Image (cartoon, helix red, strand yellow):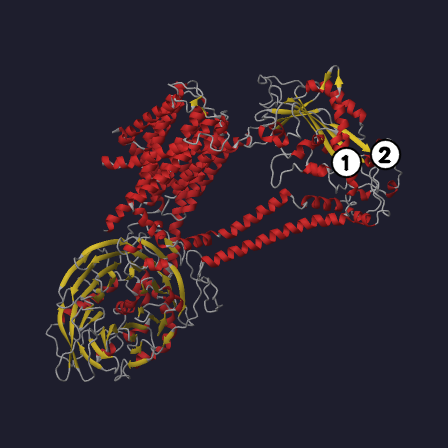
Amino acid sequence: MPLKRLRQNISAAFYRHGLLCASYPVPIILFTSASILTCCYPLLKLPLPGTGPVEFTTGVRDYSIPSHESPGDLSERPDWYQGPPVAYIQQVLVKAAVSPWDNSLVPVDVFRSPLGRVFSVLEEIRNHVYTDRSLEALCLQVTDLLPGLRRMQAVLPEHGCLLVSPGNYWQNRRDLFDADPDLLKTVHQHEPKGLHTSATLKDLLFGVPGKQTGVSLYNKKRVVTYTITIALSSYDARFVASLRARLKQLHPSANCTLREDHMVHVHFKEEIGIAELIPLVTTYIILFAYIYFSTRKIDMVKSKWGLALAAVVTVLSSLLMSVGLCTLFGLTPTLNGGEIFPYLVVVIGLENVLVLTKSVVSTPVDLEVKLRIAQGLSNESWSIMKNMATELCIILIGYFTFVPAIQEFCLFAVVGLVSDFFLQMFFFTTVLSIDIRRMELADLNRRLPAEAGMPPPKPGPLRPRETPPPPRPSPHTITLQAPAFRNLRLPKRLRVVYFLARTRLAQRIIMVGTVIWIGILVYTDPAGLRTLLAAQVSEQSPLGEAGLPPHLGVAPVFPGRDPTSTLSVLPAPEPTPLPENQSQGHRAARPEVVPVSSPQITWGPEDEELWRRLSFRHWPALFSYYNITLAKRYISILPVIPVTLHLSPQEAIDTRHPQDTHHAPPPSIKTSDLQADLTLYKVAALGLFAGVVLVLLLFCLYRVLCPRNYGQNGVPHGRRRRGDLPCDEYGYSPPISEISPLLLRGHSMDIECLASDGMLLASCCLARQIRVWDAQTGDCLTVIPNNGLRRSSSSGCWEHRDGWDHIGACEAENIFPIRRRTTPARPALFGDQPDLTPLIDTNFGSLPPSQTLSSSGFDFGGLVEKAYQEHETSPTLAFPPSPPASQQRRRSLGDQPVLPPELPPQNNGDWDSSVWAMELRGNLIATGRSSGKLELWDAVEGSLRCSNEDGVSGITALAFLNNRIVAARLNGSLDFFTVEITKPLGLLQYRGPPGRGSLPPSPCYSSEDVISCQLTRSVQCAHQKQITVLKAAAGRVVTGSQDHTVRVYRLEDSCCLFTLQGHSGGITAIYIDQTMVLASGGQDGTICVWDVLTGSRVSHVYGHRGDVTSLVCTTSCIISSGLDDLICIWDRSTGIKLYSIQQEVGCGASLGVISESLLVTGGQGCVSFWDLNYGDLLQTVYLGQSSEGQSVRQLLVLDNAAIVCDFGNELSLVYVPSVLEKLD
Amino acid sequence: MSADVLLSGGAPMRRGPYISRITNRTMNLLIRAAMLFMVGVFLALVLNLLQVQRNVTLFPPDVISSIFSSAWWVPPCCGTAAALIGLLYPCMDRRLGEPHKLKREWSNVMRCVAVFVGINHASAKVDFANNVQLSLTLAALSVGLWWTFDRSRSGFGLGVIIAILATLATQLLVYNGVFQYTSPDFLYIRSWLPCIFFAGVITVGNIGRQLALYEYKVSQEKTHQD
């Protein structure tokens, strides 16, 4: 019992919390963000993860090896500064130049003799002894190189001091150096090709970045820089000091003010090797798979990706919060964060988030958002709390293992769990509520235009919606459901193309590729971009040598003297203030004219710590060659010893190798520039070429993959004034067809009824004029005027025509509200429209006495009374939304009580009663009138062949099959008529028994025949309420009614076979075909599929959010359209929704199936063709110039693959475009 | 066009060749076995890398420097074992007539795999005070894994049996000198080995059941259609 009470309490608390979150989303999100940031604040103190080295500087003078004990004092000594370093690095920085420069010198002289001096300096260092300590005793002794570095064996020192210098290239032997014909080749032969991130051999040996060495033929400064790097195993301050003093004394550096009092300790982090990376990567892959599979389950929300992002953000920020909180309370994580992170995510999990989402979206849609959130939360409260308690228990158990690492993990996990719970409850719930509200808003917006003219809807939905419908993103998009089925139907090729199109993958790849390419270009610097830029910068800067006063430039040069004095006094004189490029170009052309600048050696603060410019992997790389790891250890770098060398030109000439002069005389800077430029051009051209090839390749791929000429035939058209072209989900807008439909003009008012039997086409307009057309050619064959005899009496009707045109336009727009919403306010809305009044027959009671046919034996009085009563009450009834074909009728019906009858009762009522239903078989047109009169006309001659006035209630629907006509009446009765054709000879000529085959033969008759139409049976109470739909096929007559039932009758004996119950609203659409498939759709938005043979329900699906307006079947699927402007395609056998097509608001709901895979829908002034297999919009055909406001309400598919649709007062005959024919 | 022809063939033809091939039982079995084999090989490689890093197992030195950081026969053996176990679990479920019902989702399977890798990670990386503690912790973790993701008695029994058999096999291998552990503490092997085996069996069984779910679904759909 206490458990139960606890449960109730938890549930109530969650409910209240949900209400809170949904009520104040913005403050709560702000509060959550603030708390996340606060909790993450301590993270700023943590070092960023990475393998970059850390530095610590101490003074040289009072240096002592740090003790191993942790420092007691709270100095800023880092933790790693303990114990002796791996090595002390002493660098001797040598700057050498041949000075003064002589025009007789060749470029090789720039570096040959300066490099040659390294051997003497080396000798000096090696032999330096200070109080019986030599370098041999102090330096770091190295043994073998790593086995994999055999090729470096000749270059790097083995067995002895770790002392590297450029001399290593020549095994530290002067004779080898002197014998080397091409120094540059020797230096560069070890350089790796292509991309490299670690230190190269050149960097290692020279000890300065490659660009600064000056060892190149195009060295403009003519100063060579290199270092001799000594690794010392122990630090002897006096030895180092004496070495420094000695070198300085030998090679004094003037104006050198390098600081010598700081020692830098560099600590290297642990490097992550491939072997350790693989498990890490694996765990991350598993983590991402987990997140993917989890978020895939989020469904039925407005933005799936947004929620998935919110879920991931929840988990991540909870982790960050936990780390921050742990840091705040002094629990600095010693574990490798990256390693345990995936496990933490898995432990914390996304489950709660998913459960919450699922629970909330499964609450009733018609509830308020607040209540939905609250209800969803409280439903899941118990399981959430239970899971949380279980996890905490597990973690507690883990804590008692007393293993430090596990304890730490557990502590972490506890904090993470709590913060995750907090974020789920506050952050995610609020985001969810916002999302759900957005979804509802989107729904509302979609419906708003239709409701604009309506009184505000009552609070509370008129009809509760049972299940939450899927989100509807935007007009003319296809909402895909059940990805498995979608995959089944789409070929792989198309899916790939769609994927590419949807994600704009190609563009993004190209973009990223370009960026990477540029990055690589800059990084590897193949064309010397950086030097080019640097040169340009130095040219532009006013501080160049050119800015020096000219009188200094003529100062004499002292060739044989101590070079120090020369250089100390004189910076390089550059008399011509020309840019360097130009001056050198001039010099190459006329070397004797332009004075030559002498190289100068300067020491600046940038030389103090030249090693900083090296790759941070420089030292680890050097030591790793000797299998010494610097990971988690540190080295101490001693202040650099500057050495300046000046060489006379004579010395340079003496050290020349005989081949050096064979080199071309200094290539003019022009050619060198040209060379650089050439490389640049080469690279640029290569890049351009690659880009072009890539584009061509993609283009070819595109052409291969996309067989359709997307948008190629897109003729510019000014017809479409609405901005948005219909397009499918992938943004593909098919070309607008320039096919001009055949317009059949002649009617003066809107066409109301349309019937065809394949050859002929009969149409009836509101003016009750019936026209018969040839379905092939579109010729008007016959016109049956509405009032051949009594034109004068109905002139009132025609007088209204002036006003009709403009009223008609607004009236056409007002169609939407009628069919969009069932509302009792409708009569008030339309009561002021006078245009329909003359067309409406209101005098049911006064049947014309002069009826030709024999009067029936029924007493009509009661019926008339009933009809009147029904008419009185009909406006307050829920208006039966129905296929647009019948709307005009209904409207006139609804208006009846409001409008006073203007016309006096007329004798010949059949002219004035409007045609409510029309059917065409053979040459006979059957019309059902509002007066309840059934007439048969000869379609060719336009003569009335017979009429039957047995019923008084208006005929709402007609079915003409073989020789039988079934008429459904307003009062719910169903009349079966038999058409008998009596030849003058008295022969009956029918072809074929009923229900024999595909097309029932038309009754054959000639004009002499006497045609009679007799009521064979009248089912008085076929339905409790009016019959809305009547369909006949395969010997069955199916009626659907407002009373929520469908009835199946046998045509021959008018026997009711089944009453099908299953809808919870009036029936609005029925489909039956020759294969005895019966589908029905109702006002409740459900679609039922029935087995006509047994009367059992095959499937029952909830399809639309409003009435089902029309239904069509193919052999494999059912297509339905509803008031929600959605066209849904269902699998016929399983009843599973394959996909749905969102149409524009207010588009027609007419549907037609041309073939197995071709669907045609009517829209605003256009018809659209869809590929049923993929849901693609294939083509849109516009019907007329004045396409605005007119929507296609009826659509008939003829046998010759043409479609006929009504279009205002015209008929459009559209032949299926040739593009589409290919598809079949 | 071919798709059109295929699709217009009516309801029974609408299944593509791919699906019908999946529906084929033996083909399905083969696919599943191959997938499980790959999973086994992959896990063996990755987890071995973890062990090798800590020098838990010793293989001949030249093999270590190779890409696969373990003897060539380990991954195929693990793969085969994974395939067998992964097929055995759903088969057993069907025989016993008690289908596994606990949270049959891929996200859950992924979670299970992650926890398994985590257990291995812990066994290789975390410093425990002594081996008993380590083994006990891992045993608790393994049972927790079973409780979280399986909870079927048959699964537990099969896991225990296979773990014992695998431990015996490992002992035999070590006894015959094929490889060795650096610090064996329980009859030539490490005492946590049975726990790892048990967790592995549970994980692979979970994957196998999830894979078998597809066949089950397809066949169910088929009978429904018939």
Q: Amino acid at mark 1?
A: Arg
* Secondary structure beneath label 2: helix
Image spot of residue A967 (x, y percent):
19, 70
Residue type, label 2: Thr
Between B219 and A193, the one nearer to me in the picture: A193
> Which of the image's four quarters has the N terminus of chain A?
top left
Q: Nearer the viewer, residue A355 or B165?
A: B165
The answer to which image quadrant residue A286 occupies is: top left
For discs 1 and 2, the disc positioned in front in the rendered view: 1
Judge whether A1033 appears above or below B169 on screen.
Answer: below
User: Counting other residues with Cα less than 10 Å from the Cα at mark 2, is it few (<14), some (14-19), or many (20 or more)?
Assistant: some
Q: Is residue A707 left or right of residue A206?
A: left
**Quadrant (top left, top right, bottom left, bottom right) of the C terminus of chain A:** bottom left
> Percent x, y for residue A96?
78, 33
Query: Are discs 1 and 2 both within one chain?
Result: yes
Asked whether disc 1 touches disc 2, contact meaning CB atoms under 8 Å apart, the reply is no
* Vertical arrangement, residue A350 with respect to residue A1186, above or below: above
Q: Which mark is residue A112?
A: 1
Separation (CA) of disc 1 from disc 2: 22 Å
Q: Nearer the viewer, residue A418 or A1057?
A: A1057
Q: Residue furthest top?
A: A132
Task: Name the side, left or right, on which A1204 lies relative to A162.
Answer: left
Mark 2 — residue?
A: A566
Name the chain letter of the residue that bears numbered label 1: A
Please state the horizontal and vertical placement of residue A397, each as a whole percent of the image: 37, 24
Read off the chain for label 2: A
Q: Which mark is residue A1027?
A: none
Residue at screen point 66% across, 30% down: A154
Q: Quadrant of residue B203?
A: top left
Q: Secondary structure at mark 1?
A: helix
Report whether A120 appears left or right of A947.
right
